[in-house]
Amino acid sequence: WLAFQNDGTYSAADYAKVMSESVSNSQAQREWKLWNPFEWKESIKRRQIFVIKILRGAIHGLAFMHDHDRLHQSLGPASVVL
């Protein structure tokens, strides 16, 4: 059976794609479009923390499903709905 249905608009795969394209475009144009351009390292750190929180949530959800004998299909970045 299907454990859940994706009714969301964005997934973790979408986030990764958008952010990598944004960084690539900014680097190519030598323009850093950040909230505070003087804190590039802080911006990267915030993104890392965001990704870690997403991964922890996904792993906790997967552990919950396994603990309660729920079946799931293959999992990937598109399986994590934001």
Image (cartoon, helix red, strand yellow):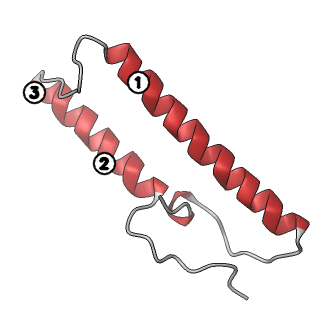
Left or right side of 61 for 64: right
Q: How many labels does the image show?
A: 3
Local SS, label 2: helix
What is the quadrant of residue 19 in the picture? Answer: top left
| Residue position for label 2 | 18
3 versus 39 height, above or below? below
| Residue position for label 3 | 29
Local SS, label 3: helix
Q: Which of 71 and 4 is in front in this view?
A: 4
Which amino acid type corresponds to the residue marked 1 in the rendered image? Answer: Ile
What is the quadrant of residue 35 in the picture? Answer: top left
Local SS, label 1: helix
48 versus 21 height, above or below? above
**What residue sits 46% from the left and 22% below the top?**
45
Left or right side of 19 for 64: right
79 versus 4 height, above or below? above
Ranked by sequence position, the earlier of labels 3 and 1 is 3
Mark pair 2, 1: CA separation: 15 Å
| Residue position for label 1 | 44
The furthest residue to the bottom = 1
What is the quadrant of residue 25 in the picture? Answer: top left
- For the N terminus, the quadrant is bottom right
Ranked by sequence position, the earlier of labels 2 and 1 is 2
Between tags 3 and 1, which lies in front? 1
38 versus 16 height, above or below? above
Q: Position of residue 78 (x, y in %)?
A: 50, 63
